[in-house]
Amino acid sequence: MTEDRFYQILEAYGADPARWPADERADAEAFTRAHPDQAGSVIAAENALDELLGDIAQPVQVSALLERRLIARLPVPSASRWMAPTAVAAALLVGVCLGFASGALTGGYNADDTLYADAFTGYEDDWVDWLGEDA
């Protein structure tokens, strides 16, 4: 077992050998016996951390007053989340209505007249002659 791997095991699993990976436990314990000075100080530091974390893991009793204060500070749901989609829908509806209204106000649009006028204005010959005998 390398020194780096031993430190990785301690950092990941803590100082208690019972929590170390079973396939590496014997090698880690052998490293501890072979290097008592290095391993001993690191194990002591990890043991102190384990104890601290063990104390924190105990359930905390929350007073009723604190619970009411926390609940009172929670944000209140509001209807504002519907304001943006409603505004977008209203703008879309107004745009569509104005688009149709502008066509009615200008006297209408006859697509057939302008389609043929635009399609064949560049030709000097009659378009039937241009198609040839197949027409």
Image: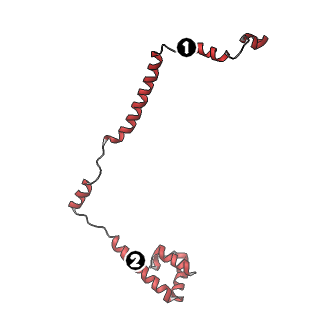
- Nearest-to-viewer mark from 2 and 1: 1
Three-letter amino acid code of the residue under disc 2: Leu
Q: Are marks 2 and 1 in contact (CB under 8 Å)?
A: no
Residue located at (55% from left, 78% from top): 4
Horizontal and vertical percent for residue 129?
A: 75, 10
Residue located at (32% from left, 70% from top): 58
Q: Earlier in the sequence, mark 2 or mark 1?
A: 2
Asked if 61 appears above or below 98 in the picture, the reply is: below
Mark 1 surroundings within 10 Å by alpha-carbon count, few (fewer than 14), some (14 through 19), many (20 or more): few
**Foreground: 100 or 2?**
100
Asked which secondary structure carries label 2, the reply is helix
Residue 17: mark in rendering: none
**Foreground: 28 or 92?**
92
Residue located at (74% from left, 11% from top): 125
Residue 110: mark in rendering: 1
Asked if 94 appears above or below 44 in the picture, the reply is: above
**Foreground: 26 or 125?**
125
| Picture quarter with the C terminus | top right
Horizontal and vertical percent for residue 60?
A: 29, 67
User: Which residue position is annotated with label 2?
Assistant: 49
Horizontal and vertical percent for residue 22?
A: 52, 75
| Picture quarter with the N terminus | bottom right
Three-letter amino acid code of the residue under disc 1: Asn
Would residue 12 appear left or right of 77 to someone viewing this image? right
Q: Quadrant of residue 51?
A: bottom left
Asked if 34 appears above or below 21 in the picture, the reply is: below
Give the spatial CA distance, label 2 vs label 1. 84 Å
Q: How is the image coloured?
A: secondary structure
Would residue 60 appear left or right of 121 to someone viewing this image? left
Residue located at (61% from left, 16% from top): 115
Would residue 65 appear left or right of 130 to someone viewing this image? left
